[in-house]
Every structure is written in C-alpha cells, then in structure tokens.
Amino acid sequence: MMNIVIIEDELMTAEDLVNIIDDLDKDISISAVLHSVEDSIKYFLKNPLVDLVFSDIQLGDGLSFEIFKTVQVDAPIIFCTAYDEYALEAIRNNGIDYILKPFTGTSVIKAIDKYNKLKRYFVPTVSDFDKLIHAITGDASMGNEYSSILVYYKDKVVPVKFTDIALIYIDGEVNRVYCFNGKTYVISQALDELEQMTRGHFFRVNRQYLVNKLSIIDATHYFPRKYVLNLSIPFKEAIVVSKNRTSGFLQWLTQK
C-alpha cells in the first residue's frame, strides 16, 4: 500500500487530486489532505512515514518549502504549481517531478508512474530550502550557480561534478549521466532542467543529449546543416547535432 499526503490550500483542487488518485489505484491510500504550512508541520512531526507527497508551493500562510525546512520528510515530493519558475527550482532541489496547474489525470498518472519506476533509487536527502525560499521570493543575493549533479548510486545520493561528466542523456524511460571514467548513473531530473543547470558547460545538441564541451574532439559535417560529434569517450551511439541547433552549437564551441 502506497501512502500519499496532499498539501493544497485550494479545496476544489485538493478534491480533484484526491479523486484522480483514488480512481488510479486502489492500493494507493491518501493518508492526509493538509491545507497550510502550520498544519503540515504538525502532521509530519507526528506522522513521518509517508511514501509520496503532492505539495502546492504557494500556500495561504507561506511557501511549502518552509514545511520541509522545519521537518525532515524523507518521502519524494511532487510539487504542484501554476508557475513554471517555481516548479523548475523545486525539482532541482527536492522534487522528483512537478505538475503545472491546472493538472490533468494524465499528468498525475505520469508523475506516479515515474515515482514507481525510480523509487528503488530514492534515499533521504537534505536540501538547502533557505536558498530555495530566497530564490522564490526574489532575493538577488542568493546565487543559482551549480557545479554538480546529484546521482543515484546503490543506496546513496552522490554529487558528481560537471567536469567529471561527459554526457547527460535519455535512455528509454530513465535519464543518465555518462562520466569520463566510463561510469554511468541514474538521475531524477529532466533534461530541460539540467540544460538550465549546466548552461555554459554543456550544450543540448538534440532532444536526447546534453554534451560537455570537454568531451568533444571535433564535429564532422553530416548532411546539410548537421554535424556528428567525435568524442573523447567510447560511447556506443553516434550523436548528431540537430539542424535547428547547429548555429548555436558552433557559436558555443568558440566560447570559453
């Protein structure tokens, strides 16, 4: 039985989410529907054992990040929000996924399916919610520079530096990083978020691959306005720069 907690201050939205989840699987139990930061903190202090949390970000009495800053919640969190920028910051810091409002049955099902596929990799982590709260509230003094990606290895979450990663790519239903030493790791973030995190270090050459500049030896012209990358690593697949990304890619290669 999977136990889910919903944190949502809009009653109709909370009810819609409950109905969608109830219809999805009878082995899923809604343990609680909470409507505020204060109520959520009180709940998790007494009920820490939860499998998955659906949480709105902007609640009536503050940001939901205050909850997870105050009480350690080991369960993965799927953030629900109407604001893209909130969702992207959330997933980078503590979420396994995000749902943009108004959400649909399909988006909820996809999020739970992703949880089921990746749950064996989940381990408790500690996120910097102070930094996230400042980023959301517009404090320009809080930087958003990243130098590492968190990867899943056995029962641990391990930071891997950008300089150690040759490729980030989609492998079927799973996203992975391929390191210069030949090791690969599973990651939870989507390539869209990772593209923003690694901007400058990596380039999104097509829908499937983010490539580190340090891994590129050269690029061979391939059909009109396309290039195939010659890499310094023994990667099994040929990586082609999409036609609509060629101009930006060539410009990026010339930058420091």
Image (spheres, rainbow, N blue to C red):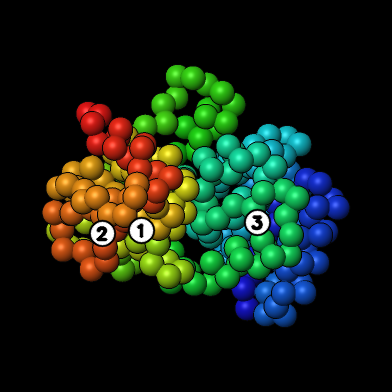
Task: Kindly identify which residue carries mark 2.
Answer: 178
Residue in front for this viewpoint, 163 or 211:
211
The answer for how far apart the CA atoms under marks 1 and 3 are is 27 Å
- State the mark number for residue 29: none
At 65% across and 39% down in the image, what residue appears?
A: 83
Q: Which residue is mark 1?
A: 169
Q: Secondary structure at mark 1?
A: strand
The residue carrying pointer 2 sits among few (fewer than 14), some (14 to 19) or many (20 or more) residues within 10 Å by Cα, namely some
State yes or no: discs 2 and 1 in contact (Cβ < 8 Å): yes
Closer to the chain start, of discs 2 and 3, is: 3
Q: Is residue 114 left or right of residue 156?
A: right
Please state, as top left, top right, bottom left or bottom right, where the C terminus lies in the image: top left
Task: Say if 212 sits above or below 48 in the image.
Answer: above
Gap between marks 2 and 3, in whole Å?
Answer: 31 Å
User: Quadrant of residue 250 in the image?
Assistant: top left
* Viewer can see residue 23: yes
Front: mark 2 or 3: 2
> As drawn, which residue projects farthest toward the right?
12
Asked which secondary structure carries label 2, the reply is strand
Label 2 and label 1: CA atoms lie apart by: 8 Å
Residue 61 image-quadrant placement: top right
- Under circle 3, the secondary element is strand
Q: Amino acid at mark 2?
A: Tyr
Is residue 205 something that shows in the picture?
Answer: no
- Considering depth in this image, is 108 or 50 the residue closer to the camera? 108
Label of residue 54 in the image: 3
Q: Residues within 10 Å of mark 1 (few under 14, many from 20)?
A: many
For image coordinates 75% across by 50% down, the residue present is: 102
Residue 9, relative to residue 233: is it above or below?
above
Residue 89 sits above or below residue 116 on the image = above
Residue at x 53% of width, y 43% of height: 88
Rate crowding at label 3 as few (under 14), some (14 to 19) or many (20 or more) other CA atoms within 10 Å.
Answer: many
